[in-house]
Image (cartoon, rainbow, N blue to C red):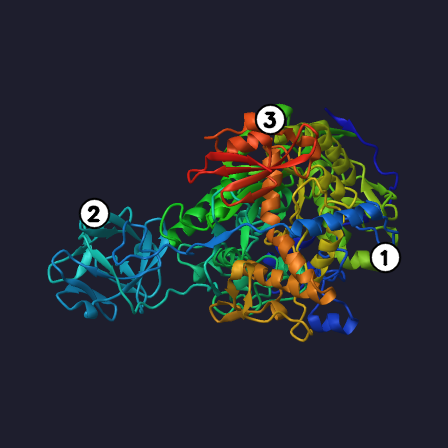
């Protein structure tokens, strides 16, 4: 299945350090002080930049502004500067679409109820999970209590008021730190039990339920036992302790949520949902690129002080040797201290530090988010080039590891909330399960893939032929494995061309680096040629061209490394923009999309070349498959209306609030009136994507705290340790600030056009429902019969198809998606024999079974 592709006619080459940021990091590891030799490539100081008038820099080597509207705030990542833009739909179609969305907003909202954020705490724990986050005394069967004097623990016959109290910090399901003011209850090497200043494996106790209480043991070690004389120590069987809720425990150090009010839920498990959706984030990125690039992690057994720490190589150099962080952020150094001060990170431009700590996810959920797509991500070649690693660089090995870690995070959050299934983070595998989860007041988490070499499907260019490293059978086997693992959303490419399709590439100096890595992976460079898109927008990423690089720049950028390594590939100097990759969708890529559709997995055409994306949408339309979405603005405007027409869904890259409001306005004119409309965002946090910058405290319309969020919750500034974040001055520094960002959208839109503040929040609140309806259609459920007159069945047919006792799923299969899902009823449209529209209401019993059907 080899494919011949002519080499670019341009033969002029420029030397490139294909490793760029990654090799520079390697140099920094060898020369941590940044002096001498090739270390002359180190970043200029901020003072030097300021003197030259150079803005903050995305690569550390050339001027770049993270707020550049051609990047994170653009309607698409493929932008042709200076081109005349042609709207992909007519003015009449745009106006009709906007009017349709306005009618959608006027529909009645579903009835919502409130549910407790955490389970109610009983005086005595009901099981070994229920004490998480609680304060308790420990009492033996004889009535004596555990007491504490300094760091010494003993059992004595004292009044309960004199007993020691212990805060139970869950480390895992059924595992706890027993926290007191001096520290943690710990098994000492000599077998005694006392309080130590810091947690560790010997302080991680397993609770075991017994008839008269609980016993505690260090698994797989000895149990906590009362020794003669009343001292605590290890023993073979353990002493049962009765736990009772107490007061006076010191809090365990942890990030705050700062949201008041209970989460919203549905009146029934099958009604329309409300909530925000993020269709593109990398919550397990702490394991990618070998596991040593990303600093911090979304959780740790011992909480925020241990999860939110800097990378060892950053810490050892006091933040001055973090070359990759500096290259990406434009800052020459940073304070490596995370918890509790967080002086320099997390921040919108700090791209190697953790942004999705579980308490920040919790704040997003409490603030109204109800659907979260976690994309498993890897780039094998960049992983191989990075000098520090602890994990395999194979894309699929990394994806499997990250999938396992998602389950571990779910278990950890369950542990904090009192037991299996009780946490807010619920991994789901179909839209029906997702709807039940959201209507229970929790957050549905979808597992997806965004990687450069999925299924091992790279290729090698041999004598002008592309020789794929995988077969259709390999793809089928991998799709089956990924589906069994829980993956339900997928992109075909990320940074490199592969055996499935050509890639859109990256722009500028970053593109030079990634293009070199593409050569190292495939033996060929991106086949970028000059193109003139009909709409002036739909091109691939703009490459560095001959006039862009002077000899002096070449020497400054790449000369030192070229001399040092002497083995770097040469990158083509391309024709003038616009640029389009000549590699499109391969036969294997087409086979993969068909395989996704057969398995009801969602296809994301982002990162594909324009040529490949157009071919993939041709196939989607041929298959009449609605399971398609663009998750973070790596598609192009020629494709967006096609996605909507297919019954798909779009979540633009979040970026700055002002830029996102403009994206929202553009998308309103592309909506398809045959489908429910809602809107979402793609944060791309932890994916080396810059987050939204602050508008500044001095703007005339800042976000004011506390503010009222979705369904009436109140949000104040978020705190963690000594740090307080404010969206006005900090931007989207970490994931917990996305509810604040939505509020900023409201403020910005309202200032631009009165009434638009409520409109954009309404569209965002309908985002989770729109995603679920797209996913339902991917499962074969027909679009609703009110928006689609040609799908209306006769009233007689409806009477035959919908009968008492049917489940909600059976009703969907029989007559398609409801136009309205209000509590215990579905609304449809039928037609009379005279072809007049007839409203249909299907009501359900308390058990979710059809109890009646009415017409008119």
Looking at marks 3 and 1 on the same chain, the residue that comes earlier in the sequence is marked by 1
Q: Which residue is mark 1?
A: 550
Residue 742 visible: yes
Residue 282 tag number: none
**Residue depth check, mark 2 versus mark 3: number of the one nearer the observer:** 3
Tell me the CA gap for discs 2 and 3.
61 Å
- Residue beneath the point at 73% across and 36% down: 523
Q: Is residue 79 shown above or below 314?
A: above
Tell me the CA gap for discs 2 and 1.
77 Å
User: Quarter holding the C terminus?
Assistant: top right
Tell me the CA gap for discs 3 and 1.
76 Å
- Residue beneath the point at 52% across and 63% down: 315
Q: Nearer the viewer, residue 358 or 429?
A: 429
Label 1 environment density (alpha carbons within 10 Å; few <14, some 14–19, many ≥20):
few
User: Quarter holding the N terminus?
Assistant: top right
Looking at marks 2 and 1 on the same chain, the residue that comes earlier in the sequence is marked by 2
């Amino acid at each position: 299945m080899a494919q011949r592709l002519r080499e670019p006619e341009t033969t002029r080459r420029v030397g490139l350090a294909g490793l760029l940021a990654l090799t520079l990091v390697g140099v920094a590891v060898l020369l941590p002080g940044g002096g001498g030799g090739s270390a002359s490539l180190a970043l200029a100081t901020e003072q030097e930049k300021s003197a030259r008038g150079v803005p903050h820099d995305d690569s550390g080597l050339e001027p770049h502004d993270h707020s550049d509207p051609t990047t994170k705030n653009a309607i698409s990542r493929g932008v042709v500067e200076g081109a005349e833009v042609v709207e992909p739909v007519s003015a009449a179609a745009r106006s009709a679409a906007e009017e349709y969305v306005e009618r959608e907003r006027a529909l009645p909202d579903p009835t919502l109820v409130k549910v407790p954020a955490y389970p109610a705490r009983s005086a005595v724990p009901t099981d070994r999970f229920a004490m998480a986050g609680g304060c308790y005394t420990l009492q033996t069967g004889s009535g004596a209590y555990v007491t504490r004097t300094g760091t010494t623990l003993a059992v004595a016959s004292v009044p309960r008021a004199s007993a020691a109290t212990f805060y139970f910090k869950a480390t895992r399901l059924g595992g706890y730190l027993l926290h007191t003011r001096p520290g943690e209850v710990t098994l000492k090497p000599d077998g005694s039990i006392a309080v130590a200043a810091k947690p560790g494996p010997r302080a991680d106790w397993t609770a075991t339920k017994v008839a008269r209480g609980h016993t505690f043991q260090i698994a797989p070690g000895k149990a906590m036992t009362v020794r003669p004389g009343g001292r605590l120590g290890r023993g073979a069987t353990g002493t049962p302790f009765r736990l009772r809720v107490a007061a006076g425990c010191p809090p365990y150090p942890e990030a705050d949520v700062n949201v008041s009010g209970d989460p919203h839920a549905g009146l029934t498990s099958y009604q329309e949902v409300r909530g925000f959706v993020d269709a593109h984030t990398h919550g397990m990125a702490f394991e990618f690129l070998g596991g040593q690039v990303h600093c911090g992690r979304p959780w740790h057994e011992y909480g925020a002080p241990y999860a939110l720490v800097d990378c060892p190589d950053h810490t050892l150099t006091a933040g001055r040797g973090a070359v990759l962080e500096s290259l990406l952020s434009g800052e020459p150094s940073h304070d490596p201290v995370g918890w509790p001060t967080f002086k320099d990170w997390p921040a919108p431009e700090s791209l190697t530090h953790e942004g999705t700590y579980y308490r920040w996810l919790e704040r997003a959920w409490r603030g109204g988010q109800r659907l979260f797509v976690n994309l498993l991500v890897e780039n094998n070649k960049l992983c191989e080039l990075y000098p520090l690693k602890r994990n395999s660089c194979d894309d699929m090995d990394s994806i499997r590891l990250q999938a396992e870690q998602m389950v571990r995070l779910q278990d950890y959050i369950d542990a904090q909330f009192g037991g299996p299934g009780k946490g807010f983070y619920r991994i789901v595998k179909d839209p029906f399960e997702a709807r039940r989860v959201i209507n229970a007041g929790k957050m549905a988490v979808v597992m997806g893939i965004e990687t450069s070499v999925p299924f091992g499907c790279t290729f090698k260019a041999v004598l002008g032929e592309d020789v794929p490293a995988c077969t259709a059978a390999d793809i089928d086997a991998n799709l089956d494995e990924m589906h069994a693992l829980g993956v339900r959303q997928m992109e075909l490419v990320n940074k490199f061309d592969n055996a499935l399709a050509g890639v859109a590439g990256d722009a500028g100096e970053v593109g030079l680096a990634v293009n070199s890595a593409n050569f190292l992976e495939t033996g060929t460079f991106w086949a970028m040629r000059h193109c003139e898109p009909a709409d002036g927008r739909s091109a691939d990423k703009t490459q560095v061209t001959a006039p862009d690089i002077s000899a002096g720049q070449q020497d400054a950028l790449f000369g030192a490394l070229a001399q040092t390594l002497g083995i770097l590939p040469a990158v083509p100097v391309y024709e003038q923009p616009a640029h389009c990759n000549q590699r499109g969708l391969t036969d294997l890529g087409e086979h993969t999309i068909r395989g996704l559709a057969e398995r009801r997995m969602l296809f994301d055409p982002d990162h594909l070349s324009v040529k490949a994306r157009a071919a993939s949408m041709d196939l989607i339309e041929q298959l009449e498959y609605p399971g398609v979405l663009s998750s973070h603005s790596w598609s192009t405007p020629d494709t967006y209306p096609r996605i909507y027409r297919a019954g798909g869904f779009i979540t633009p890259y979040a970026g700055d609030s002002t830029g996102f409001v403009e994206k929202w306005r553009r998308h309103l004119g592309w909506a398809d009136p045959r489908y429910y409309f809602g809107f979402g965002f793609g944060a791309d946090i932890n994916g080396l994507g810059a987050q939204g910058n602050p508008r500044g405290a001095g703007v005339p319309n800042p976000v004011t705290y506390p503010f009222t969020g979705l369904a009436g919750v109140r949000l104040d500034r978020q705190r963690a340790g000594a740090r307080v974040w404010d969206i006005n001055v900090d931007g989207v520094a970490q994931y917990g600030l996305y509810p604040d960002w939505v509020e900023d959208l409201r403020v910005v839109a309202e200032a631009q056009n009165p009434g638009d503040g409520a409109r954009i929040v309404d569209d965002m609140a309908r985002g989770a429902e729109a995603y679920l309806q797209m996913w339902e259609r991917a499962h074969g459920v027909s679009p609703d019969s009110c928006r689609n007159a040609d799908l209306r069945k006769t009233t007689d047919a409806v009477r035959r198809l919908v009968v008492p006792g049917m489940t909600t799923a059976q009703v969907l299969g029989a007559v398609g998606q409801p136009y309205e899902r209000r509590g215990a009823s579905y609304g449809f449209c039928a037609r009379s024999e005279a072809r007049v529209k007839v409203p249909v209401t299907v009501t359900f019993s308390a058990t979710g079974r059809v109890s009646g059907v009415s017409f008119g």
